[in-house]
Amino acid sequence: MDNRYRSILVIEDNDGDFVLIEDYLIEAFKTIQINRHHTFGDYIKNQKSDIKHDLILLDLHLPDSSGSELIHKILESNPPVPVIILTGYADLSLAKDSLKLGIDDFLIKDETTPGMLHKSIEFALSRSLYIKQIQTQNEKLKNIAWTQSHVVRAPLSRIMGIVNFIESDEQQPDELSFWLKQLKSSANEMDAIVKKITSEAQAIQLKKDE
Amino acid sequence: MNKTIFIIDDDPLLRLLVERMMTVVDKSLTFIPCENGKTGLDRLNEYLGSSTSCIVLLDLNMPVLDGWAVLNEIQATPMSSRQNMTIYILSSSTDISDLEKAREYECVKKFYHKPLNRDDIVQILNGG
């Protein structure tokens, strides 16, 4: 029995199937909130007002949409949480293909046990947590790359420009000390930027538990 | 040659450096330094009536109005069809997306990465 609180949205029109899934969920999780929609339309209509669920269990045959169309529709609705498909043997190959599209897992209804349901849900949740962390990390790395290209290169290119000019030997005799002073100040500016990037890069760490 | 050079860049040292290096190559140049895109556009508009040719060195990252906004404004006005105005981007950015974006602007003759060396300067003054 799992003590963690989970909130699951079940989109299932068939009452018998829903009751079964509900039983399994209650058996697998000690504290669970289960909400239900009967159709895909209901899910879309309530997407904004619904409480924030941890995961969606989706029956592949709903009155207003089914099969491949339903898979595409739910992914297009950009669910912020993992989606697990509930299906029969007839849709096995479709269910397998859906994993490539972005569905997190599928369960064959007749084979599902509370243990399997629990495992599938927990795996999907921990995977999605890691993916979110990696996405955040990628975002930060992209920012660092941008900073390298724009912010670091500003004082650096100034230093290189000043050196070009000094090398050209065209400056007035009293000018040199001015340009050397500018070199130093640009070098200091660059040093500060590099230090800032280092501390930002060090702040990127995968949080193991959340 | 009597060319006018617009240096639109928020870095005063860069403006000074370009001016000094260009003067070495051609003493007859007139410089109009502008500290951001807004000032740059104002000065360019004032200059519209003039018949002497001008070269615009445009930085990308600037406060108030950045280089992209300046380019958008230039493209949207008759300024872009001026025969005697040559626009160069002069940026410290090495970001590939900036290079690609710059290609979308027909009025931009070339993208230069800072710093300019003497060969670049000679090339720019000779028309790219």
Image: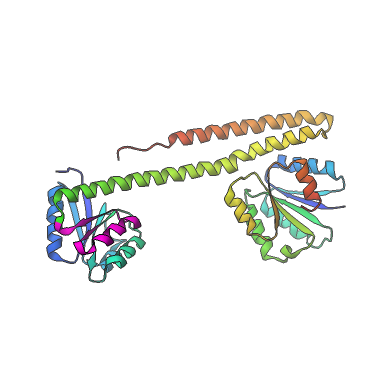
Query: Where's the C terminus of chain A, which quadrant?
Result: top left
Front one among A33 and A120: A120
Q: What's the residue at 24%, 46% (across, down)?
A: A122
Q: Is residue A196 left or right of residue B125?
A: left
Coordinates of residue B65 in the picture (x, y in percent): 63, 53
> Was residue A31 drawn as part of the magenta stretch in this picture?
no
Front one among A172 and A96: A96
Front one among B101 and A68: A68
Quadrant for residue B16, please give it: top right
Q: Is residue A161 left or right of residue A208?
A: right
Coordinates of residue B87 in the picture (x, y in percent): 73, 55
Above or below, B10 against A61 in this view is above
Coordinates of residue B119 in the picture (x, y in percent): 77, 43
Q: Is residue B44 left or right of residue A130?
A: right
The magenta-colored residue range is: A85-110
Quadrant for residue B117, please give it: top right
Q: Is residue A88 visible?
A: no
Q: What's the residue at 72%, 66% (across, down)?
A: B78
